[in-house]
Image (cartoon, rainbow, N blue to C red):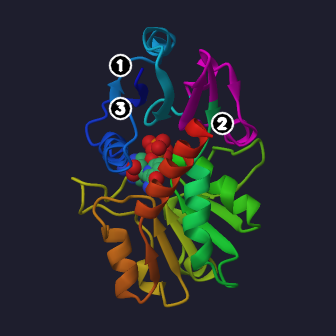
Protein backbone atom coordinates (compact mmCIF):
# COMPACT_ATOMS: atom_id res chain seq x y z
CA UNK A 1 0.00 0.00 0.00
CA UNK A 2 1.21 3.47 -0.86
CA UNK A 3 1.86 5.70 2.20
CA UNK A 4 -0.21 8.84 2.30
CA UNK A 5 0.58 12.26 3.76
CA UNK A 6 -1.27 15.53 3.59
CA UNK A 7 -2.06 18.96 4.93
CA UNK A 8 -5.18 20.20 6.69
CA UNK A 9 -6.18 23.85 6.76
CA UNK A 10 -8.55 26.22 5.05
CA UNK A 11 -8.75 27.49 2.34
CA UNK A 12 -5.32 26.01 1.42
CA UNK A 13 -5.23 27.98 -1.84
CA UNK A 14 -1.51 28.85 -1.82
CA UNK A 15 -0.05 25.97 0.20
CA UNK A 16 3.55 25.07 -0.58
CA UNK A 17 3.55 21.59 1.02
CA UNK A 18 1.89 19.33 -1.65
CA UNK A 19 4.28 20.50 -4.38
CA UNK A 20 7.27 20.30 -2.05
CA UNK A 21 6.55 16.77 -0.80
CA UNK A 22 5.36 15.30 -4.12
CA UNK A 23 8.55 16.62 -5.79
CA UNK A 24 10.57 15.07 -2.98
CA UNK A 25 8.79 11.71 -3.43
CA UNK A 26 9.44 11.81 -7.19
CA UNK A 27 13.12 12.74 -6.97
CA UNK A 28 13.91 10.37 -4.08
CA UNK A 29 11.82 7.46 -5.47
CA UNK A 30 9.58 7.33 -2.42
CA UNK A 31 6.32 5.46 -3.01
CA UNK A 32 4.02 7.96 -1.32
CA UNK A 33 1.55 10.72 -2.10
CA UNK A 34 0.87 14.05 -0.36
CA UNK A 35 -2.60 15.60 -0.65
CA UNK A 36 -4.23 18.90 0.33
CA UNK A 37 -7.28 18.42 2.59
CA UNK A 38 -9.09 21.76 2.79
CA UNK A 39 -11.49 20.94 5.62
CA UNK A 40 -14.11 23.57 6.39
CA UNK A 41 -14.45 22.62 10.07
CA UNK A 42 -11.92 20.95 12.38
CA UNK A 43 -14.71 18.65 13.60
CA UNK A 44 -14.10 16.76 10.34
CA UNK A 45 -10.64 15.70 11.60
CA UNK A 46 -11.55 12.35 13.31
CA UNK A 47 -13.46 11.23 10.20
CA UNK A 48 -10.51 12.16 7.96
CA UNK A 49 -8.22 9.91 10.04
CA UNK A 50 -10.79 7.09 10.02
CA UNK A 51 -11.41 7.31 6.25
CA UNK A 52 -7.70 7.30 5.35
CA UNK A 53 -6.03 4.28 6.97
CA UNK A 54 -2.84 4.74 4.91
CA UNK A 55 -2.29 8.24 6.27
CA UNK A 56 1.08 8.41 8.06
CA UNK A 57 1.44 12.13 8.60
CA UNK A 58 -0.32 15.46 8.33
CA UNK A 59 0.84 19.05 8.25
CA UNK A 60 -1.47 21.58 9.90
CA UNK A 61 -1.86 25.17 8.81
CA UNK A 62 -4.12 28.21 9.31
CA UNK A 63 -6.66 28.13 10.99
CA UNK A 64 -6.28 24.76 12.80
CA UNK A 65 -2.88 24.80 14.53
CA UNK A 66 -4.51 25.36 17.91
CA UNK A 67 -7.99 23.84 17.51
CA UNK A 68 -6.68 20.47 16.28
CA UNK A 69 -5.04 19.76 19.65
CA UNK A 70 -8.18 18.51 21.38
CA UNK A 71 -8.65 15.83 18.68
CA UNK A 72 -5.17 14.32 19.14
CA UNK A 73 -4.33 11.23 21.22
CA UNK A 74 -1.02 12.66 22.45
CA UNK A 75 1.02 15.82 22.04
CA UNK A 76 4.79 16.42 22.22
CA UNK A 77 6.20 18.49 25.08
CA UNK A 78 7.17 21.53 23.00
CA UNK A 79 3.87 21.63 21.12
CA UNK A 80 2.03 21.44 24.45
CA UNK A 81 4.05 24.36 25.87
CA UNK A 82 3.51 26.44 22.73
CA UNK A 83 -0.16 25.50 22.41
CA UNK A 84 0.11 24.97 18.64
CA UNK A 85 0.62 21.89 16.43
CA UNK A 86 1.75 22.03 12.79
CA UNK A 87 2.73 18.37 12.34
CA UNK A 88 0.84 15.17 13.21
CA UNK A 89 2.24 11.65 13.13
CA UNK A 90 -0.26 8.80 12.69
CA UNK A 91 0.77 5.33 13.83
CA UNK A 92 -1.63 2.40 14.33
CA UNK A 93 -4.52 4.87 14.12
CA UNK A 94 -3.12 6.97 16.99
CA UNK A 95 -2.27 10.64 16.42
CA UNK A 96 0.58 12.62 18.02
CA UNK A 97 1.02 16.36 17.55
CA UNK A 98 4.33 18.21 17.21
CA UNK A 99 5.49 21.73 16.45
CA UNK A 100 8.20 21.90 13.77
CA UNK A 101 7.79 25.67 13.18
CA UNK A 102 10.01 26.10 16.25
CA UNK A 103 12.71 23.92 14.68
CA UNK A 104 12.55 25.86 11.40
CA UNK A 105 12.64 29.23 13.10
CA UNK A 106 15.45 28.37 15.51
CA UNK A 107 17.74 26.77 12.92
CA UNK A 108 17.24 29.60 10.41
CA UNK A 109 17.68 32.39 12.97
CA UNK A 110 20.68 31.13 14.94
CA UNK A 111 23.40 31.58 12.28
CA UNK A 112 22.45 35.27 11.97
CA UNK A 113 22.49 36.11 15.67
CA UNK A 114 25.18 38.39 17.09
CA UNK A 115 25.79 39.52 20.67
CA UNK A 116 23.76 42.70 20.09
CA UNK A 117 20.60 40.72 19.30
CA UNK A 118 19.64 40.26 22.94
CA UNK A 119 16.29 42.10 22.74
CA UNK A 120 13.63 41.32 20.17
CA UNK A 121 10.48 43.02 18.99
CA UNK A 122 7.89 40.53 17.79
CA UNK A 123 5.34 42.18 15.51
CA UNK A 124 1.95 40.42 15.74
CA UNK A 125 0.61 37.99 18.30
CA UNK A 126 -0.96 35.05 16.46
CA UNK A 127 -0.09 31.36 16.07
CA UNK A 128 3.33 31.80 14.47
CA UNK A 129 4.31 34.39 17.10
CA UNK A 130 3.86 31.67 19.74
CA UNK A 131 6.50 29.49 18.08
CA UNK A 132 8.81 32.51 17.60
CA UNK A 133 8.51 33.50 21.26
CA UNK A 134 9.14 29.94 22.42
CA UNK A 135 12.46 29.98 20.53
CA UNK A 136 13.44 33.47 21.71
CA UNK A 137 12.75 32.42 25.31
CA UNK A 138 14.90 29.33 24.82
CA UNK A 139 17.75 31.46 23.41
CA UNK A 140 17.51 33.91 26.32
CA UNK A 141 16.47 36.84 24.10
CA UNK A 142 14.21 39.38 25.82
CA UNK A 143 10.89 39.86 24.04
CA UNK A 144 8.54 42.78 23.53
CA UNK A 145 5.41 41.99 21.52
CA UNK A 146 3.84 44.65 19.34
CA UNK A 147 0.14 43.92 18.96
CA UNK A 148 -2.99 45.74 17.98
CA UNK A 149 -4.46 44.14 21.10
CA UNK A 150 -2.28 44.70 24.18
CA UNK A 151 -3.91 42.25 26.51
CA UNK A 152 -2.61 38.92 25.25
CA UNK A 153 -0.25 36.63 27.20
CA UNK A 154 2.07 33.78 26.29
CA UNK A 155 2.72 30.59 28.30
CA UNK A 156 0.86 32.12 31.25
CA UNK A 157 3.81 34.45 31.66
CA UNK A 158 3.32 38.13 31.04
CA UNK A 159 5.41 39.32 28.12
CA UNK A 160 5.73 43.05 27.70
CA UNK A 161 3.20 43.97 25.04
CA UNK A 162 2.84 47.38 23.46
CA UNK A 163 0.74 48.67 20.60
CA UNK A 164 2.00 50.29 17.40
CA UNK A 165 1.24 53.82 18.66
CA UNK A 166 3.60 53.26 21.62
CA UNK A 167 6.48 52.14 19.40
CA UNK A 168 9.05 54.97 19.70
CA UNK A 169 12.36 55.47 17.86
CA UNK A 170 14.05 54.72 21.18
CA UNK A 171 12.40 51.29 21.39
CA UNK A 172 13.54 50.51 17.82
CA UNK A 173 17.09 51.58 18.76
CA UNK A 174 17.05 49.26 21.77
CA UNK A 175 15.67 46.21 19.92
CA UNK A 176 18.12 45.12 17.26
CA UNK A 177 16.16 42.00 16.31
CA UNK A 178 12.73 42.72 14.76
CA UNK A 179 10.54 39.82 13.64
CA UNK A 180 7.42 40.24 11.52
CA UNK A 181 4.88 37.54 12.32
CA UNK A 182 1.93 39.48 10.85
CA UNK A 183 0.64 38.69 7.35
CA UNK A 184 1.29 42.33 6.30
CA UNK A 185 3.14 42.30 2.97
CA UNK A 186 2.24 38.73 2.04
CA UNK A 187 1.30 38.11 -1.62
CA UNK A 188 -0.98 39.50 -3.07
CA UNK A 189 -1.06 42.28 -0.45
CA UNK A 190 2.59 43.14 -1.22
CA UNK A 191 2.43 46.90 -0.58
CA UNK A 192 1.40 46.66 3.07
CA UNK A 193 3.94 46.58 5.92
CA UNK A 194 3.99 46.86 9.72
CA UNK A 195 3.80 50.47 10.92
CA UNK A 196 7.11 50.94 12.78
CA UNK A 197 9.61 53.85 12.68
CA UNK A 198 11.93 52.53 9.95
CA UNK A 199 14.01 55.74 9.91
CA UNK A 200 16.06 54.64 12.95
CA UNK A 201 16.87 51.17 11.64
CA UNK A 202 20.59 50.74 11.00
CA UNK A 203 23.27 48.20 10.17
CA UNK A 204 23.15 46.59 13.64
CA UNK A 205 19.54 45.55 13.11
CA UNK A 206 18.40 42.13 11.95
CA UNK A 207 14.93 42.10 10.35
CA UNK A 208 13.34 38.66 10.02
CA UNK A 209 10.05 38.22 8.15
CA UNK A 210 8.18 34.92 8.45
CA UNK A 211 6.62 35.64 5.04
CA UNK A 212 8.33 33.87 2.12
CA UNK A 213 6.23 35.19 -0.79
CA UNK A 214 7.33 37.69 -2.04
CA UNK A 215 10.99 36.96 -1.35
CA UNK A 216 11.56 40.55 -0.22
CA UNK A 217 8.54 42.05 1.49
CA UNK A 218 8.16 45.81 1.88
CA UNK A 219 9.18 45.34 5.56
CA UNK A 220 12.45 43.71 4.48
CA UNK A 221 13.01 46.19 1.63
CA UNK A 222 12.73 49.08 4.07
CA UNK A 223 15.22 47.39 6.39
CA UNK A 224 17.62 46.71 3.54
CA UNK A 225 17.47 50.37 2.50
CA UNK A 226 18.77 51.19 6.01
CA UNK A 227 21.57 48.56 5.74
CA UNK A 228 19.96 46.10 8.16
CA UNK A 229 20.57 42.36 7.76
CA UNK A 230 17.37 40.80 6.38
CA UNK A 231 15.97 37.28 6.33
CA UNK A 232 12.73 35.92 4.87
CA UNK A 233 10.71 32.85 5.95
CA UNK A 234 11.68 30.49 3.13
CA UNK A 235 14.44 28.63 4.96
CA UNK A 236 12.15 28.27 8.01
CA UNK A 237 9.50 26.78 5.71
CA UNK A 238 11.93 24.21 4.27
CA UNK A 239 13.37 23.33 7.68
CA UNK A 240 9.94 22.80 9.28
CA UNK A 241 8.95 20.52 6.36
CA UNK A 242 12.18 18.49 6.67
CA UNK A 243 11.65 18.19 10.43
CA UNK A 244 8.08 16.93 9.81
CA UNK A 245 9.38 14.32 7.35
CA UNK A 246 11.87 13.06 9.95
CA UNK A 247 9.10 12.77 12.55
CA UNK A 248 6.81 10.87 10.16
CA UNK A 249 9.49 8.42 9.08
CA UNK A 250 11.71 8.03 12.14
P1 LIG B 1 -2.33 34.51 12.54
O1 LIG B 1 -2.52 33.51 13.63
O2 LIG B 1 -3.47 34.98 11.76
O3 LIG B 1 -1.59 35.73 13.27
C1 LIG B 1 -1.10 36.86 12.65
C2 LIG B 1 -1.08 38.01 13.66
O4 LIG B 1 -0.69 39.17 12.95
C3 LIG B 1 -2.44 38.32 14.24
O5 LIG B 1 -2.67 37.59 15.40
C4 LIG B 1 -2.37 39.81 14.49
O6 LIG B 1 -1.81 40.09 15.77
C5 LIG B 1 -1.39 40.29 13.44
N1 LIG B 1 -2.13 40.90 12.32
C6 LIG B 1 -3.03 40.31 11.49
N2 LIG B 1 -3.50 41.21 10.60
C7 LIG B 1 -2.89 42.38 10.88
C8 LIG B 1 -2.98 43.68 10.33
N3 LIG B 1 -3.79 43.96 9.30
N4 LIG B 1 -2.23 44.67 10.88
C9 LIG B 1 -1.40 44.41 11.93
N5 LIG B 1 -1.29 43.20 12.49
C10 LIG B 1 -2.01 42.18 11.97
O7 LIG B 1 -1.29 33.96 11.47
P2 LIG B 1 0.01 33.08 11.76
O8 LIG B 1 -0.31 31.65 11.64
O9 LIG B 1 0.64 33.56 13.03
O10 LIG B 1 0.92 33.45 10.48
C11 LIG B 1 1.45 34.75 10.37
C12 LIG B 1 2.39 34.83 9.17
O11 LIG B 1 3.50 33.96 9.34
C13 LIG B 1 1.73 34.42 7.84
O12 LIG B 1 2.20 35.30 6.85
C14 LIG B 1 2.26 33.02 7.61
O13 LIG B 1 2.32 32.69 6.24
C15 LIG B 1 3.66 33.15 8.20
N6 LIG B 1 4.22 31.85 8.62
C16 LIG B 1 5.37 31.43 8.01
C17 LIG B 1 5.95 30.23 8.39
C18 LIG B 1 7.22 29.79 7.73
O14 LIG B 1 7.57 28.61 7.82
N7 LIG B 1 7.94 30.69 7.09
C19 LIG B 1 5.36 29.44 9.39
C20 LIG B 1 4.19 29.90 10.00
C21 LIG B 1 3.63 31.11 9.60
P3 LIG B 1 -2.48 41.22 16.73
O15 LIG B 1 -3.97 41.04 16.59
O16 LIG B 1 -1.96 40.86 18.07
O17 LIG B 1 -2.02 42.54 16.22
The quadrant holding residue 226 is: bottom left
Q: Measuring from the top left, give residue 198's x and y in whole percent.
A: 42, 79
On screen, 131 above or below 75?
below
Task: Point out the image quarter for the N terminus.
Answer: top left
The structure residue drawn at horizontal position 57% and vertical position 69%, both measured from the top left corner, is 109
Horizontal relation, residue 42 to residue 183: left or right? right
Label at residue 40: 1
Q: Nearer the viewer, residue 44 or 123?
A: 44
Task: Point out the image quarter for the C terminus.
Answer: top right
Callout 2 crowding tier (Cα within 10 Å): few <14, some 14–19, many ≥20: some
| Callout 1: SS | loop
Horizontal relation, residue 89 to residue 215: left or right? right
Q: Nearer the viewer, mark 2 or mark 3?
A: 3
Horizontal relation, residue 108 to residue 198: left or right? right
On screen, 164 above or below 37?
below
Q: Tell me: is circle 2 under 8 Å from ligand 1.
A: no
* Mark earlier in primary sequence (1, 2): 1
Q: Is residue 173 visible?
A: yes
Label at residue 105: none
Which portion, as a residue range, is magenta? 67-96
Horizontal relation, residue 140 to residue 101: left or right? right
Amino acid sequence: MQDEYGIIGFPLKTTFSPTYFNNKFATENIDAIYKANPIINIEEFPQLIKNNPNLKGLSVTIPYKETVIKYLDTIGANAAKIGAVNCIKIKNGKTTGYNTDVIGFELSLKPLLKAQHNKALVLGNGGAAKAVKFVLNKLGIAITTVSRNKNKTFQNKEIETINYEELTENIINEHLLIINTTPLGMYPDVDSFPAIPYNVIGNNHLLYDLIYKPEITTFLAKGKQCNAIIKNGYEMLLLQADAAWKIWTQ
